[in-house]
Amino acid sequence: MHKNRREVIKMLSALGASTVLAQSLAQQMQPMAANLETIPAKTIPWEQGTCAFCGMPIKTPAPGAWMGRTFTPGFFEQTYSQIALKEPQKGMEAIHFESIACMVNYAWVYGLRDGVGSTFYVADRGLYDPAKGPEAVRLLPARQAVYLWGEKRGWVVMDAKVAAFKNADAAMAFARTTPDLGRTRVLDWQTLLDLAPLPEMNLVSLLAKHAGLLK
């Protein structure tokens, strides 16, 4: 169910008062259903696609092309995420995101549920080679993936601190070979849903925008 303005205002107030999101959110999440629909992943519009939550490109922009900034090649694609839809919405067969946090937060605001008229997908960071960019992206159903949270700022786009892997061994192998991640945790899909909305850059203004509180 789409979050109404009162619910989002309540959440924004909680964000201003506390960084412990789970305490005020866990009761809002519904348990995952036993019989979940699996809708095939859709084609990714790499060249023109933008994130439905934050508006950034889903493909790493050329140096200086996005707000004058330069990003490491392949940086955005490593956390590409998608909600494949059973029935098109506004002419779209899928909703695209450049970070896992953006997808989870969008779904939280609009009441979308994985396996109920949609299937959520994430890029497998363990199989991804940044030097190859979009052609190296392989998607996993989000409910089957595990998620590495790393304390370091800026290791993924939007400072979302989360990337997806096929299993815990792959996640920890990545952590061991990636310097300065700081503290790490391996989380499952349900945990991400329980913690939604997930911390990322501009979270308060983005939630307010999608709830219709900002123009």
Image: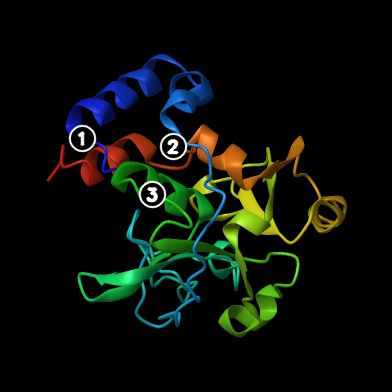
Q: Comparing marks 2 and 3, which lies closer to the viewer?
A: 3
What is the secondary structure assignment of the residue under circle 2? loop
Residues at circles 2 and 3 in contact by the CB criterion of under 8 Å:
no
Q: Quadrant of residue 29?
A: top left
Residue 57 on image: x %, y %:
40, 68
Alpha-carbon distance for marks 1 and 3? Answer: 13 Å
Alpha-carbon distance for marks 2 and 3? Answer: 9 Å
Residue type of the residue flagged with mark 2? Pro
User: Which quadrant of the figure contains the N terminus?
Assistant: top left
Residue 15 on image: x %, y %:
39, 23
Residue 208 on image: x %, y %:
24, 37
Residue that carries the numbered disc 2 in the rendered image? 197
Seen as rendered, the residue at the extreme left is 215
Residue that carries the numbered disc 1 in the rendered image? 4
Residue that carries the numbered disc 3 in the rendered image? 107
Residues at circles 1 and 3 in contact by the CB criterion of under 8 Å:
no
